[in-house]
Image (cartoon, grey):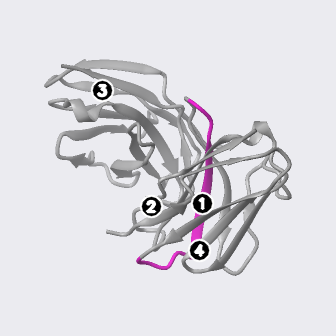
């Protein structure tokens, strides 16, 4: 079955630094990928929709200058948390599908801890 | 805006018994998709079942079935013959296009041996 790979699975960084998270569709092309954020014991909140070859669409309240999304190819989307602060510590998950009518596949997530 | 409500933060079931998880949603659309996802301690999201709103028949996947009440905007999940491996967080989700999902707050299911 289709697989979405997310890397790294866990990252610890110092406050003020930037962190990049990668989301890859391993055996299919994904024109659209999604980025979610999940705080402990809470639900997944959609942050943005990543579109190949164009700008990402951000949800209301999500700072686009802080959470930079680049969908450079049909198999790769990256989320960069810029100038990270402790309040950015969270679990970040990406998802992708081949097409709108097909099942959505989720990455295994990235736990970000900002010290 | 579409919202998804799961009113049961925690549920418990005895192994081999049946449990029903509740979900309601709010939308003005007539065509949409509803999902139940399982998130075990690994935190990997696993699709349990999907329902297309235009289909009146309730979706079923082995021991998992839903009760979809479109007029009431209700979408409950029934787990039959519960197994220890069913213990996880369960999220109800709504999507207009099968991709852009909005999740409920989740229900933590405990299975007692």
Asked if A66 appears above or below B86 in the picture, the reply is below
Alpha carbon separation for disc pair 2 and 1: 10 Å
Indicate the chain on which mark 3 is placed: B
- Which residue was labeled with disc 2? A104
Residue A76 is tagged as 4
Side of A101 where A77 appears, left or right: right
The reply to whether the C-beta atoms of the residues labelled 2 and 1 are less than 8 Å apart is yes
Alpha carbon separation for disc pair 1 and 3: 29 Å
The reply to whether the C-beta atoms of the residues labelled 3 and 2 are less than 8 Å apart is no
Residue A34 visible in the displayed image = yes
Q: Secondary structure at mark 2?
A: loop
Which range is magenta?
Answer: A27-40
Indicate the chain on which mark 4 is placed: A
In front of the other: label 3 or label 2? Answer: 2
Side of A78 where B7 appears, left or right: left
Neighbour class for label 2 at 10 Å: few (<14), some, many (≥20)? many
Alpha carbon separation for disc pair 3 and 4: 38 Å
Q: Please provide percent x and percent y for residue A20.
A: 70, 61
Q: Nearer the viewer, residue A17 or A80?
A: A17
Q: Please provide percent x and percent y for residue A109.
A: 53, 51
Q: Please provide percent x and percent y for residue B20.
A: 30, 26
Query: Are the residues under badges 2 and 1 in a single subunit?
Result: yes
């Amino acid at each position: 079955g289709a697989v979405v790979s997310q890397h790294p699975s866990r990252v610890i960084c110092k406050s003020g630094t930037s962190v990049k998270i990668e989301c890859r569709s391993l055996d299919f092309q994904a024109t659209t990928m999604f980025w979610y954020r999940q705080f402990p014991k809470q639900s997944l909140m959609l942050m943005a929709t990543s579109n190949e070859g164009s700008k990402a669409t951000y949800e209301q309240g999500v700072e686009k200058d802080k959470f930079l999304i680049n969908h450079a190819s049909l198999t790769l989307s990256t989320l960069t948390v810029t100038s990270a602060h402790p309040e950015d510590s969270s679990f970040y998950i990406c998802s992708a599908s081949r097409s709108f009518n097909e099942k959505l596949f989720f990455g295994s997530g990235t736990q970000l801890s900002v010290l | 805006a579409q919202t998804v409500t799961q009113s049961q933060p925690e549920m418990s079931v005895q192994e081999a018994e049946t449990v029903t998880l509740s979900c309601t949603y709010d939308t003005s659309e007539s065509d949409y998709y509803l999902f139940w996802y399982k998130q075990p301690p690994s935190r990997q999201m696993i699709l349990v079942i999907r329902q297309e709103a235009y289909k009146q028949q309730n979706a079923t996947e082995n021991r998992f079935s839903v009760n979809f009440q479109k007029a009431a905007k209700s979408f409950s999940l029934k787990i039959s013959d519960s197994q220890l491996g069913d213990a996880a967080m369960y999220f109800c989700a709504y999507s207009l296009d099968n991709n852009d999902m909005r999740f409920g707050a989740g229900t933590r299911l405990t299975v007692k041996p």
